[in-house]
Amino acid sequence: MIQINEQRLESDLGYRFEYLVEFMGFGEEDVAAIHGAAPVIAPLVPTLVDAVYDKLHRYDATWRHFLPRQFGYEGVVPTSLEEVTPDHEMIRFRKAHLARYLAALVTKPYDAKMVTYLDGVGKMHTPKAGSKELNVPLVQMNALLGFVADALTNTILGLGLERALEVQTLRAFNKLLWLQNDLINRHYQQAIVPAAVS
């Protein structure tokens, strides 16, 4: 039986990620499948980004989070929800961030730097990083990630890949998004450190 330091899972990001990777079986073949999808997914990123923002714009519970100044954004900040139009400069700024994120998923190596980046994606949607005014509820983060997962699945299924490669690619992205899900959720939970097993 593999011994896991549960306290370290809560305090050591690299240890946590390695545990998740090993438990889910996210390996080199998965990374190769994700990177192999880059040439066909990259041209579809603008369409994916637009679909995500169209969905976010449909609900006040998601769109209201674009009212506060976004970290790194230097332009005019809207003062009402009505001013936050889909073509507002701040929305274009956020769309560019999402496009870079999706591109990173299919091009970057899954090393310590990438793990920190994926962890930051969760953290930046809370007051713990980025804008102190930004505090997106976990239910909205889960809804968004579920939508992105379905959009990626639909995109992959529409590529006309040979069946074995299609299955491998779908499974790889599924594992990746569950890894991302954990690295979002961990920033929303209270720090409950399990007692050591004697």
Image (cartoon, rainbow, N blue to C red):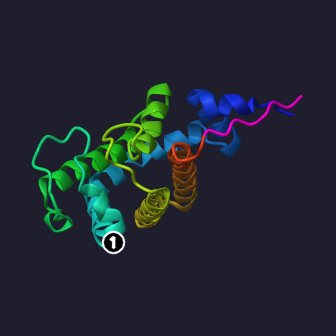
Residue furthest right in the image = 198
- Residue 25 sits in which quadrant? top right
Q: Residues within 10 Å of mark 1 (few under 14, many from 20)?
A: few
Whether 130 is among the magenta residues is: no
Magenta span: predominant SS is loop
**Which quadrant, please, contains the N terminus?**
top right
Report which residue position mark 1 lands on. 59
- Residue 127 sits in which quadrant? top left
Q: Is residue 48 above or below residue 21?
A: below
Q: Is residue 98 left or right of residue 105?
A: left
The residue located at (41%, 67%) in the rendering is 158
The residue located at (39%, 50%) in the rendering is 135
* Residue 98 coordinates in the image, percent (x, y): 31, 49
Magenta residues span 191-198
Q: Is residue 187 above or below residue 116?
A: below
* Residue 142 coordinates in the image, percent (x, y): 49, 59
* Residue 94 coordinates in the image, percent (x, y): 25, 50
* Residue 190 coordinates in the image, percent (x, y): 59, 43
Residue furthest left in the image = 76
The residue located at (61%, 29%) in the rendering is 11
Of residue 107 and residue 183, the one placed in the foreground of this image is 183
- Residue 167 sits in which quadrant? bottom right
Of residue 11 and residue 133, the one placed in the foreground of this image is 133
Residue furthest bottom in the image = 58
Whether 193 is among the magenta residues is: yes
The kind of secondary structure element at disc 1 is loop
**Which quadrant, please, contains the C terminus?**
top right
